[in-house]
């Protein structure tokens, strides 16, 4: 049985598949989306332990998702890790949000998941 459910948000198919494989190897279950619309749909149906997201998806910036999540009480505790480049505005927003964090896009996904789920 999977230890945690992780939502992967990336518009890059190869990156998403690499993340998925790494997490599956660690015993986690992963769902993925390449659009904000799909991400919001999945979040409305399941409560992930962690969301790993690139700075932008096919239909918008992840900052939009962070704003949406802030208003939903059950999801306020979900940790969101944004990987890769973000704008100065997004960096400020992430830094001010206790459950959002930023890591380099080439960070080892398995280590990120372990780090944040251990602390949860």
Image: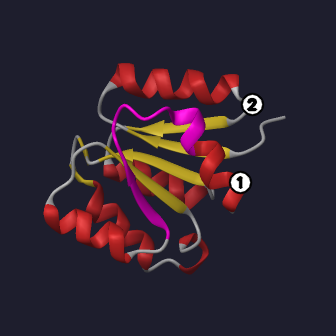
| Image location of residue 22, percent across then percent down | 58, 24
Residue holding disc 2:
27
The x and y percentages for residue 24 are: 66, 26
Residue placed farthest to the right in the image? 1
Question: Vertical placement of 48 versus 94: above or below?
Answer: above
Residue 104 among those drawn in magenta: yes
Which of the two discs, 1 and 2, sits closer to the camera?
1
Look at mark 1 in the image and give the residue it sits on.
118
What residue appears at the point 25 percent right and 63 percent down from the top-left corner? 91
The residue that appears at 44% across and 53% down in the rendered structure is 81
Q: Is 111 on the left-hand or right-hand side of 55?
A: right
Q: Residue at x 75, y 30 (%)?
A: 27
- Residue 19, compared with residue 37, is above or below; it is above
Instruction: Give the secondary structure at mark 1.
Output: helix
Q: Disc count in the image?
A: 2
- Nearest the eye: 51 or 88: 88
Where residue 20 sits: x, y (%)? 54, 27
Q: Residues within 10 Å of mark 2 (few under 14, many from 20)?
A: some
Find the magenta span and give its range: 99-112
How far apart marks 1 and 2 lie (CA) works out to 15 Å
| Residue 63 picture quarter | bottom left
Residue nearest the observer in this picture, 60 or 109 = 109
Q: Residue at x 28, y 72 (%)?
A: 93
* Vertical placement of residue 25 versus 1, above or below: above
What quarter of the picture does the C terminus occupy?
bottom right
Question: Left of 87 or right of it: where is 4?
Answer: right
Depth check, front residue: 68 or 79: 79
- Dot 2: element: loop
Q: State the residue lying farthest toward the left.
A: 88
């Amino acid at each position: 049985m999977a230890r945690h459910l992780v939502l992967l948000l990336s518009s890059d198919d190869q990156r998403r598949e690499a993340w998925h494989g790494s997490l599956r190897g660690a015993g986690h279950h992963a769902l993925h989306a390449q659009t904000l619309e799909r991400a919001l749909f999945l979040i409305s149906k399941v409560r992930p332990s962690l969301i790993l997201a690139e700075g932008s998806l096919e239909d918008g910036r992840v900052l939009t998702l962070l704003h949406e999540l802030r208003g939903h009480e059950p999801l306020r505790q979900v940790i969101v890790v944004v990987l890769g480049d973000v704008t100065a505005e997004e960096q400020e927003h992430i830094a001010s949000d206790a459950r959002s964090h930023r890591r380099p896009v080439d960070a080892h996904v398995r280590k990120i998941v372990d780090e944040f789920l251990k602390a949860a």
